[in-house]
Amino acid sequence: MKKTAVLSILVFVFAIATGVLGYLYSTKMVEKPEAAESAQLPISEMTDKWASSAHADSSSLAFRDWDETEDKKVPPTCAKCHSSSGLKDYFGLDGTAVMAVDNPAKIGNVVDCSACHNSYVETATTVKFPSGIEMAAASDVVPCWTCHQGMQGGINGDLDKKIGSTEPDAKAEGLGFVNPHYLAVGSMYLGSEANGGYQYEGKTYAGHFEHAEGVQSCTECHDPHSLHLADPGYKKCQTCHAEVTAWPDQQKIRRTKQDYDGDGDVTEPTYDEINGLTEKLIAAIVQYSKDISKAPIGYTPNYPYWFADLNENGTQDEGEAGYKDWTPRMMRAAFNYKFVSTSAGYIHNPVYSAQLLIDSISDLASGDSAIALDKFARP
Ligand code: HEC
Ligand code: HEC
Ligand code: HEC
Ligand code: HEC
Ligand code: HEC
Ligand SMILES: [Ca+2]
Ligand SMILES: [Ca+2]
Ligand SMILES: [Ca+2]
């Protein structure tokens, strides 16, 4: 990046930072220091932490995906989460309607201070989820839940509506992948209370992940500025999980006694139980695509996520476009796969994750008898 560009960004951040401080003083959230103390303003510490976080990364695709569009703006359907000015429009802070984005927003307008420090957030008590459910929320997690909620609810949301009345194993003509989108951690954490995943009829699902005192909310674990685990970092986990002695040892934690993924191993970390299930789910989706849809599918973490794997080698090669041969059964499973695998499900809600994955595999197996059903322990 050019020096002048860096400088103008710094000046810009300082301008918002000063604005935020004024706001925090006015709300008495931060005590105004005497002149002599002003050298150690908390504001510069917060700004430094924030500046090195993913929220401030103006080069990220999450803030740049619209660079080549004609009007060089983030469209209203995307702006709530990909631009602070879009979020403020959603909050009604620009004088437009509340809980609706009315105008396209600025590009490269990262998740800045004003996204979280504003008068709407301070008094808000609820957040609306893609399923249409409105959940009670403490004000400090209102911004987190608003952006980290995904774009489509599983049931009562858009998935069933888009699938319509097509039989489970019949081709759903004209249907493209119904994408839960990225990092829908708020929906994952809340489980069946926000209906983020596709929940199968006749089954019951876990609500929010209770966990333990001091590690319940987004901001109790994540520092809201650096986004890393809040001080004292992993040591906070150590009090209860002795196996955590360094980062990323949280992936070694196991509490459950159950063999979720049915591999016979009841000592592996919960991280591996959930990964074992996501691997079995993707294998089941691929098997089903060959046997029932008669059109092999593959998965890639980037757009278009699911592609027609014409040469069945598991990777997307030239000429292998987005998948078009969906059946409803396959779509529901693919939705849950993406939802769990992009929201660190093992830590934000391990039980809900295991339930969604196991039910997805079982449902595929009821449409395709060639899919092996291991001895999954459904929690
Ligand atoms: C509810 C909030 C929300 C909405 C609405 C939303 N996104 Fe996102 N999007 C996110 C989050 C959170 C990420 C995670 C960024 C990451 O992982 O880098 C993301 C990531 C992305 C990425 C980056 C993927 C990558 O590989 O890094 C693209 C591109 C994107 N979104 C496009 C869109 C488009 C296009 C729309 C509108 C049709 C949209 N988003 C609407 C929250 C949202
Ligand atoms: C993603 C949301 C988010 C963003 C972005 C954000 N903050 Fe914060 N900030 C918070 C939350 C939540 C708290 C309350 C933390 C707590 O109670 O421990 C907070 C607290 C603060 C405090 C008070 C600290 C204290 O210990 O009393 C200051 C000052 C502050 N933020 C400044 C900023 C500045 C400056 C920026 C931009 C450079 C910024 N924040 C960006 C969420 C955010
Ligand atoms: C305006 C929408 C918005 C708000 C508000 C928001 N986030 Fe984010 N968050 C994003 C986007 C977009 C990304 C991806 C950024 C990127 O790709 O650089 C992200 C990334 C993250 C990451 C991933 C960091 C990494 O290194 O991969 C964490 C953790 C996170 N956010 C936590 C939070 C928490 C906690 C809060 C509330 C205090 C919050 N976010 C509020 C949109 C938001
Ligand atoms: C018990 C502590 C804890 C709580 C509560 C928590 N997180 Fe996390 N979160 C983590 C840890 C640890 C990771 C890193 C997981 C990993 O990399 O294996 C993480 C990862 C993430 C990521 C990055 C996911 C990825 O795949 O890159 C996002 C975004 C995120 N958390 C957002 C949130 C939001 C939003 C909330 C509130 C709804 C929340 N977290 C609540 C501990 C927590
Ligand atoms: C005060 C004690 C306590 C602290 C602190 C704590 N945990 Fe936990 N953790 C538990 C308990 C108890 C469970 C089991 C919860 C349950 O099954 O409902 C658990 C479960 C988990 C699980 C799921 C394990 C499984 O098998 O289901 C993960 C992952 C986890 N904790 C990560 C963390 C991380 C990361 C931290 C630090 C940010 C942390 N915990 C801090 C008590 C704690
Ligand atoms: Ca609006
Ligand atoms: Ca196992
Ligand atoms: Ca291929």
Image (cartoon, grey):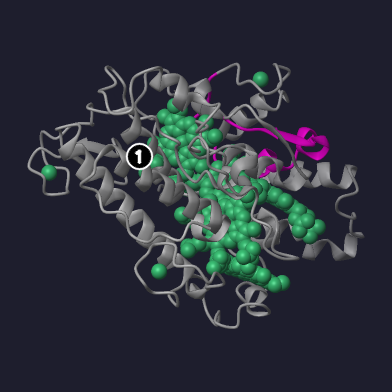
State whether label 1 is within 8 Å of ligand 8: no
Residue 84: give x, y in percent of width and height.
Answer: 60, 35
Position of 78 with respect to 276 (left or right) is right
Find the magenta span and give its range: 104-130
* Quadrant hosting residue 324: top left
Relative to the observer, which residue lies in front, 347 or 378? Answer: 378
Q: Position of residue 251 (x, y in %)?
A: 48, 70
> Residue, x 69% and y 58% (percent of image)?
210
Question: Quick one: 19 or 117, which is closer to the camera?
Answer: 117
Between 238 and 2, which is closer to the camera in this rendering?
238
Name the residue rendered at 50%, 34% in the picture: 201
Say what amino acid the circle numbered 1 marks.
Ala
- Residue at 48%, 75% in the rendered image: 252
Which residue is pictured at 44% across the width and 37% down the height? 181
- Taking the image as drawn, is residue 12 in sight? no
90 left or right, relative to 120? left
Per the image, the residue denoted by label 1 is 334
Q: Quadrant of residue 226?
A: bottom right
162, above or below 252, in the image: above
As for residue 108 lying within the magenta part, the answer is yes
**As drawn, is 323 to the left or to the right of 340?**
left
